[in-house]
Image (cartoon, helix red, strand yellow):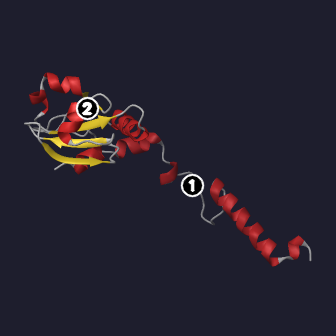
Amino acid sequence: MTPSSNPFVRTLTALSLGLVLVGCGSADTGAANDGAATSAEASPSDTETSAPAQSDQPEAGVAPGAYIDWATYQEDPAAYQDGKVVLFFHAPWCPTCQDSEESISADGVPDGLTVVKVDYDSATDLKGEYGVTVQHTFVQIDTDGAALAKWTGTISGADILAQTV
């Protein structure tokens, strides 16, 4: 039996050829191509005009999102109390902390949220105050500094906001 007469080989060959043609966008579907771009082929300028415009300004009455360090927060805590304040116990050697910092730096912090980066290794008194025992811990605090919520495991600013009360 030659390979071309083996039905299994013929089926595999036909399937492989079909996948290659479909993957390359060269399969003849029987429909005429009039040169119009499909949604997958739309140019960036096509999608830019259809997206709603986003304002860089926060909604009225909502504080803009911020990512600050502990020293900056301590200078004027009242300046950040218009929204939710979350302490982020961060360690530079922690891969999950690095992932969060990269996400927050790239995507920003949602309006109404202030994320305060606290050095996990040096803030021993603060860790004790909030019962923090592992790096990559988040603690939401109220205007008096009392803990409202505590968790680990979130990465992005949006994830952090979703965990707040």
Q: Position of residue 83 (x, y in %)?
A: 14, 39
| Residue underneath mark 2 | 124
Q: In this view, does 95 lie to the left or right of 82?
A: right
Q: In this view, does 120 lie to the left or right of 112?
A: right
Front of the two marks 1 and 2: 2
Q: Which amino acid does label 1 sit on?
A: Asp
The secondary element bearing badge 2 is classed as helix
- Residue shown at the point (34%, 48%) measured from the top left: 153
- Residue shown at the point (22%, 47%) measured from the top left: 150
Q: Which of 64 and 43 is in front in this view?
A: 64
Q: Where is residue 139 in the image (x, y as percent from the top left)?
A: 21, 42
**Which class describes the residues within 10 Å of circle 2: few (<14), some (14-19), or many (20+)?**
few
Q: In this view, does 156 lie to the left or right of 116?
A: right
**Which class describes the residues within 10 Å of circle 1: few (<14), some (14-19), or many (20+)?**
few
Q: In this view, does 147 lie to the left or right of 100?
A: left
Q: Which of 11 and 67 is in front in this view?
A: 67
| Residue underneath mark 1 | 34
Q: Position of residue 93 (x, y in %)?
A: 42, 33
Q: What residue type is labelled 2?
A: Thr
Question: Considering only order in the chain, which callout, 2 or 1, is on the residue closer to the N terminus?
Answer: 1
Which quarter of the rendered picture does the N terminus lie within?
bottom right
Residue 82's quadrant in the figure?
Answer: top left
The secondary element bearing badge 1 is classed as loop
- Measure the C-alpha gap from mark 1 to mark 2: 68 Å
Q: Position of residue 59 (x, y in %)?
A: 15, 39
State yes or no: discs 1 and 2 in contact (Cβ < 8 Å).
no
Above/below status of 130 relative to 163: above
Residue 17 visible at all: yes
- Residue shown at the point (14%, 31%) measured from the top left: 80
Above/below status of 35 relative to 32: above
Q: Which of 8 and 67 is in front in this view?
A: 67
- Residue shown at the point (16%, 50%) measured from the top left: 165
